Image (spheres, grey):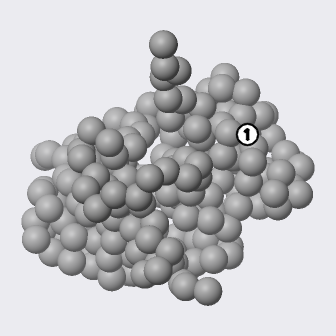
């Protein structure tokens, strides 16, 4: 009998604890950096609570990493050119229904990765400014309408529109009340 793969909550808990330990951060230090309470971080690490997209964004910003790094297993795997839809990791925000699909893992050579987002009607996701290791994103709206607030700038996107922005300022995503939206993010990390 083969062991089933860990759940996404198991993976998130393990990654937060692992990254916090690697950076030699106490719960209190990560709480201060991220704006997420020590109690909540502890509950997430002990699998007593499922984080929301906003909480994950704050934790990633506090750790100075891309959100994807909290949702992807870093165990080596056989590289393949083809990655079927059912092989792509997904995570659903328990409070909003926001669905994040890791279409293409981070490619170290190009510093690029692809993420598909389904944002339900009327949903709002707010991310803080990343404190370290800010990166760029290219958003392509596939379906629906989306308002993106980047710092003080507000963009109203329609299906087919493209927006290029970074995470060096607070970013908010708001799906229209009429219907949700689906978009693709090409995340562009600085290559070292």
Q: Is residue 149 visible?
A: no
Q: How many marks?
A: 1
Q: Is residue 108 visible?
A: yes
Q: Residue at x 60, y 31 (%)?
A: 10
Query: In terms of secondary structure, where does tag 1 sit?
Result: helix
Q: Residue at x 33, y 82 (%)?
A: 164
Label 1: which residue? 41
Where residue 39 appears, as percent x and y from the top left, is: 78, 34
Q: Is residue 25 above or below residue 192?
A: above
Drawn side of residue 111 relative to residue 179, left or right: right
The local crowd at label 1, few if under 14, some if 14 to 19, many if 20 or more residues have their Cα within 10 Å, is: many
Where residue 44 appears, as percent x and y from the top left, is: 67, 33
Q: Is residue 24 above or below residue 119?
A: below
Taking depth in this image into account, of 145 and 56 the one nearest to the observer is: 56
Residue 144's quadrant in the figure?
Answer: bottom left
Where residue 169 appears, as percent x and y from the top left, is: 53, 77
Q: Residue at x 50, y 74 (%)?
A: 108
Residue 141's quadrant in the figure?
Answer: bottom left
Drawn side of residue 5 relative to residue 186, left or right: right
């Amino acid at each position: 009998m083969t062991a089933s793969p860990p759940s996404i909550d198991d993976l998130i808990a393990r990654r937060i604890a692992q990254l916090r330990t690697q950076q030699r951060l106490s719960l209190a230090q990560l709480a201060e950096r991220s704006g997420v309470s020590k109690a909540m971080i502890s509950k997430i690490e002990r699998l007593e609570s499922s984080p929301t997209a906003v909480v994950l964004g704050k934790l990633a910003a506090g750790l100075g990493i891309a959100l994807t790094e909290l949702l992807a297993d870093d165990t080596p795997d056989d590289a393949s050119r083809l990655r079927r839809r059912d092989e792509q990791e997904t995570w659903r925000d328990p409070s909003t229904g926001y669905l994040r699909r890791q279409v293409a893992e981070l490619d170290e050579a190009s510093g690029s990765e692809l993420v598909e987002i389904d944002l339900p009607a009327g949903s709002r996701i707010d991310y803080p400014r990343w404190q370290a290791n800010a990166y760029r994103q290219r958003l392509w709206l596939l379906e629906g309408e989306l308002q993106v607030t980047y710092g003080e700038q507000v963009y109203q996107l329609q299906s087919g529109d493209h927006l290029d922005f970074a995470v060096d300022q607070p970013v908010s995503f708001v799906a229209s009340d009429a219907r949700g939206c689906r978009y693709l993010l090409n995340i562009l990390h600085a290559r070292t």
